[in-house]
Image (tube, rainbow, N blue to C red):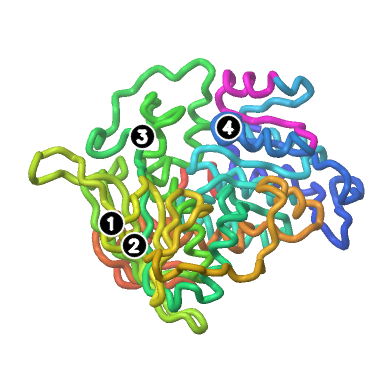
Amino acid sequence: MTKGLSRREFVGTSAGAGVGFWMTGRQIGFGQEKSPNAKLNCAVIGAGGQGGSSIGGVSKTENLVALCDIDKNRLNQAASKFPEVKKYQDFRKMLEEMDKQIDAVCVATPDHLHAQAAAAAMRLGKHVYVEKPLTHNVHEARFLRQLAAEKKVATQMGNQGTSSGGLRRSVELVQAGALGTIKEIHIWTNRPVWPQAPDIMKRPSPEPVPESLDWDLWLGPAPERPYSKRYAPFAWRGWWDFGTGALGDMACHTANMAYWAAKLTAPTTVEAEAGDLNPETFPSSARIRYEFPANGDRPPVTVWWYEGKKANAENGKRDVKLLPPLELFHGEKIKDSGSLIVGTKGILYSPDDYGGARTLLPAKDFEGFQAPPKSIPDSPGHHAEWIRACKGGPKAYSNFDYAGPLTEFVLLGNVAIKAGKKIEWDAEALKVTNCPEANPWVSRERRKGWDL
């Protein structure tokens, strides 16, 4: 299989492959039936960073049969602990050669490759786990959700807080009415912690490609450009072509609890103000306002996102961190990242990225507060929840029917940053209605040979 093999060509080579799905506790396909108690044969695409978490998460209880990474050094290092595992640099070749040996696939690549790898796996009937954000753009998130439903595979996005008992208890509390009617939500982050604007706003000079790295495979669907260490292996998050910025990196974590608790759907309008806009890297700071429509008995809700730092007029330094109105904290210490759900009866302050911790404000109004009865089952663990779903159990809570719309909401903020004006969003049609020039950013132009 060549590096530039198109999706049509790839599917053609696998036309006769068995497609597996779970039915009445038994998996059909892959040449045999498997009991729900049997171990899954798992592959991991992306062996470094979060890939290490997936390797550890599945190898505890399941069979790790294949590893894939475009960097040979990282691949060999990860595979050294699993001498029987098969190694690949190209996930398409891995799926072609090991189709009948793989039941489930974890995707832990840079953001711009998430959809490509997950779609290739699902087309062959593989269950998939994809790190957050689910995709690089809004269109890809909708595409993966629809493909997962078509192929009837078990899915999960890696926003690990979804599986924490603390987050689930907060969701129960909000949905039981402890805060009254939800009016607004504020979410902030300490990101970016990687190079982007204002330090970098143009492409770096070309550098020699490391011998261990397949740069063409690393680029995947992204526009072709010369290699620089400013892109790989870590600093890709700050570049429009590869990452999704502070918003994409953290909002699938930090906005997760509030999104679930407030029963948010798709926003109708999104407006952003951002600093140091440029065509190459994400901005130095951004404040984004999302307007969500009413849902059942809940009236419309405004959601605010804050990232980065602005210049200080008094000292000239870039040290003004964007944050929600300080009075909403009622004197509580403001953590680097967190969320506030503001209701008519009080505020839930979650002082972390994962929604697991909470404080009810103002404290005096919640003296003697009794939490509502537990209504959401506890998770067996994040990867374990997905593995259970792969074996015919309940869907993982962050399956693509949930993670897809969450990712769409999050990444619409980046579309609004690009647009530089308020955008009006038609979720059903998947398009901006008032600003046609913004619609190309809902999707992306894919490099030849890398169509979805």
The answer for how far apart the CA atoms under marks 3 and 1 are is: 19 Å
Residue furthest to the bottom in view is 297
Q: Secondary structure at mark 3?
A: loop
What is the crowding at mark 2: few (fewer than 14 residues within 10 Å), some, or many (at least 20)? many
Residue bearing the label numbered 3: 194
- Tag 3: Cα neighbours inside 10 Å, few (<14), some, or many (≥20)? some
> Label 1: which residue?
287
**Quarter of the N terminus within the rendering:** top right
Q: What SS does tag 1 mark?
A: strand
- Taking 360 as reference, is 320 above or below it? above
Amino acid type assigned to the residue bearing label 1 in the image: Arg
Is residue 70 found inside the magenta-colored segment of the image? yes
Q: Nearer the viewer, residue 111 or 189?
A: 189
Residue beneath the point at 69% across and 57% down? 378
Q: Amino acid at mark 3?
A: Trp
**Alpha-carbon distance for marks 4 and 2?**
42 Å
In this picture, which residue range is highlighted in magenta?
62-80
Which residue, given by chain and number where applicable, does mark 4 sit on?
A: 3
N-terminal of the pair, mark 3 or mark 1, is 3
x%, y% of residue 29? 85, 51
Residue 184: x percent and y percent? 37, 70
Residue highlighted by disc 2: 304
Q: Is residue 355 above or below residue 424?
A: above
Q: Secondary structure beneath disc 4?
A: loop
Q: Amino acid at mark 2?
A: Trp
Q: Position of residue 187 (x, y in %)?
A: 38, 57
Quadrant position of residue 323: bottom left
Q: Of marks 1 and 2, which one's residue comes earlier in the chain? A: 1
For marks 1 and 2, give the CA distance.
7 Å
Please tell me whether mark 4 or mark 1 is closer to you in this view. 1
